Image (tube, helix red, strand yellow):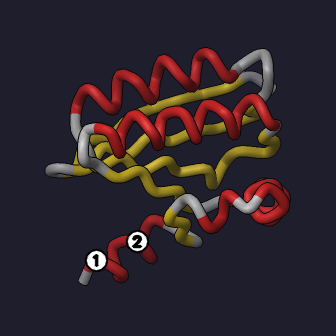
Amino acid sequence: MELALSTMVQGERTIVFVEGEVDVHTAATLRRHLDEAILQGRDIVVDLAKVTFLDSTGLGVLVGRLKAVRAQGGTMRIVGARERVLKVFVITGLDRVFEMYPALDDLDSAAS
């Protein structure tokens, strides 16, 4: 499966919707898309609800973009990771590095 990416801006927040497989073949596309989102703002949300596979290359992209956002004083949060994808974050300990939420609605509830 290929990678599909879209972006929605909500006030100060830029939400990047990711769909498909994030692997060595698609990671560069995700990196470019996230870099564009970072240029639009400092509050980045990456919605992984429709990601079916995430490998170490994809994780590397997310970690690198997290560092870039933090260097600008911003945040990058992950929402909607399915069990299979979430397990990759847990195994690597990155669930403790990223702010992670079950769904976009949960992120909104936490902000209230």
Q: How far from the left and from the top, in percent, is residue 98?
A: 54, 59
Which is nearer the eye, 52 or 63?
63
Residue name at image x 78 percent, y 15 percent: 25
Q: Is residue 61 above or below residue 85?
A: above
Horizontal side, residue 99 vs residue 58: left or right: left
Residue name at image x 75 percent, y 29 percent: 57
Which is nearer the eye, 11 or 57?
57
Q: Is residue 106 above or below residue 13?
A: below
Q: Are marks 1 and 2 in contact (CB under 8 Å)?
A: yes
Q: Is residue 64 above or below residue 88?
A: above
Q: Residue 107 carries which label?
A: 2
Estimate how packed mark 2 is, as few (under 14), some (14 to 19) or many (20 or more) residues with alpha carbons within 10 Å. Answer: some
Q: What residue type is labelled 2?
A: Leu
Q: How far from the left and from the top, in percent, is residue 40?
A: 23, 31
Estimate how packed mark 1 is, as few (under 14), some (14 to 19) or many (20 or more) residues with alpha carbons within 10 Å. Answer: few
Q: How far from the left and from the top, in percent, is residue 31?
A: 54, 23
**Where, by quadrant of the figure, is residue 7 drawn?**
top left
Q: Residue 73 carries which label?
A: none
Identify the image quadrant of the C terminus: bottom left
Identify the image quadrant of the N terminus: top right
Q: How many marks?
A: 2
Residue name at image x 50 percent, y 42 percent: 17
Q: What residue type is labelled 1?
A: Ala
**Where, by quadrant of the figure, is residue 90 drawn?**
bottom right
Q: What element carries label 1?
A: helix
Residue named by callout 1: 111
